[in-house]
Amino acid sequence: MTETVLHEDEWTGRLSEYLDDELSAGDRLALEEHLRGCPGCRTTLEQLRAVKVRAAGLGESLPGPHVWRAIAERIGAPGVTPDDAGDELAARRARRRILFPWIQAGAAAAAVLAVGIGIGRMTKGPARLPTAHVEAPAPGTSMTGGGYRVAVAQHLSRTETLLASFRADAAGGRVDASAGEWAGQMLSTTRLLLDSPAADDPKLRALLEDLELVLAQIAALPRRTDTDANTTEVDMARRAVEEKQLLPRMQTLAPAGSPATLGES
Amino acid sequence: MTGGDAALAAAGDAHAFARLYRDHAGRIHSLARRMAGDDEADELTQDVFVRAWEKLRTFRGESAFGTWLHRLAVNLILARRGASARRRSRDAGDEALEWTPARSATPELAMDFEAALRRLPDGARQIFVLFDVEGYRHEEIAEMLGLSVGTSKSQLHRARMILREHLT
């Protein structure tokens, strides 16, 4: 009894190393053997994975305008502002922040999904996200009809760009640094679109559900500051993109360069 | 776009620098808030961008501007917290274990994930943010914080063990 508890404690303390691929091959095999017979450690491992997924999907907070004003003063440019788009950007991000708790409610489920398809890792650096995202609706409104279709078309177009880039980089053994964070953003929007009452097209729902799985897998890959990818695990994500035929399916539903097509149909 | 703005800003173009701020302020502010807390985030964000303005001429474009800025921010935040942060990092292991709550009996008792992150001991929080949120490796974190790699790993694990209680 005591031995069992100590044995579990020993391995429980190494689950993060396993999750981060920091164990030696021998320890990894030993831990996997232990996991087969230890439901407690399996549960803990899944919880730790969920924490990683949650961390990968954490949103950003914009500083208030006083921060830039102080900076501008200190650099001797008091009249300069972060151009006219600054206020619009802040408002858009503020709307996303308001929705974020609701979006985050699915994070644990995402972790389970990611566990199901396996979490790999790739090397990433501090990422710069694309500046354009699908706008979430303001609180109290819903995406229906044409608005929903436009949002879907824009989202599919951007997700296609991400997956095409990821697939190419993965094939070349070098994964773009921003892929994981970008996937986290796309994952949130995918769930938003899936949860909308307007998501009533079975073909579109199936595509969004497959996208959710793959984006969760990419988003769960830990960020790195170098670019040496773990090819085996990145390949898992790349194969998922291929096997689910995501790119051709997205191109069918949202032809490149015509984001309004769905909105007008 | 950003690369061009970085070159312009390095030449003294404050408007280009304002655009860089617009593109990167959210990420830097979030980093500062998670690393140092809400109270210090605004001031740290100011300091990071002022330092970036002063050092932009040394940016050679070998990495993305965002990568360069991010590393500058991490260094500045850690330096600001200095010996105190390192001391807390060494002590954080026991503190984290003591803090670890019992599993929430009801969803109502579960704490918001970001709030739980804020309540982590300084050292464990910084390591969690640097590894799981920002993507640094244990070797890099250990060097930055003046810790051993093993300590970085163990504190990351403890942070995750605490935070798993707050996944709702």
Image (cartoon, helix red, strand yellow):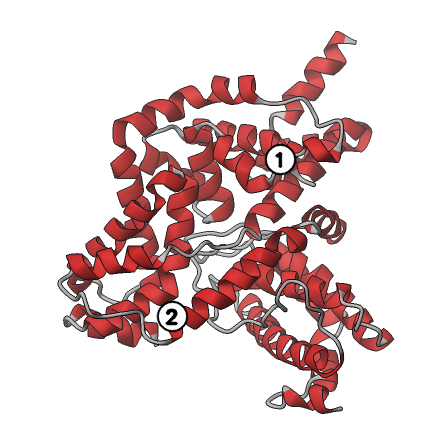
Q: Position of residue A43 (x, y in %)?
A: 75, 33
| Mark number displayed over residue A86 | 2
Question: Which residue bears the numbered disc 1?
Answer: B111
Q: Position of residue B42 (x, y in %)?
A: 33, 48
Q: CA distance from mark 1 to mark 2?
A: 32 Å
Image quadrant holding the N terminus of chain A, namely: top right
In the image: residue A183, left or right of residue B118: right
Q: Residue at x 76, y 70 (%)?
A: A244
Q: Position of residue B164 (x, y in %)?
A: 64, 34
* Secondary-structure class at tag 2: helix
Residue A62 in which image quadrant: bottom left
Residue A82 in which image quadrant: bottom left
The residue carrying pointer 1 sits among few (fewer than 14), some (14 to 19) or many (20 or more) residues within 10 Å by Cα, namely: some
Query: Type of residue at label 1?
Result: Met
Q: Position of residue B141 (x, y in %)?
A: 39, 38
Name the residue nearer the viewer: A226 or B72.
B72
Q: Residue at x 62, y 35 (%)?
A: B111
To which chain does the residue with label 1 belong? B
Name the residue nearer the viewer: B16 or A253.
B16
To which chain does the residue with label 2 belong? A
From the viewer's perspective, is residue A62 above or below residue A146?
above
Q: Residue at x 71, y 81 (%)?
A: A149
Instruction: Name, please, the residue furthest toward the top.
Output: A2
Have a look at marks 1 and 2 and say if they share a chain: no
In the image: residue A34, left or right of residue A79: right
In the image: residue B47, left or right of residue B57: right
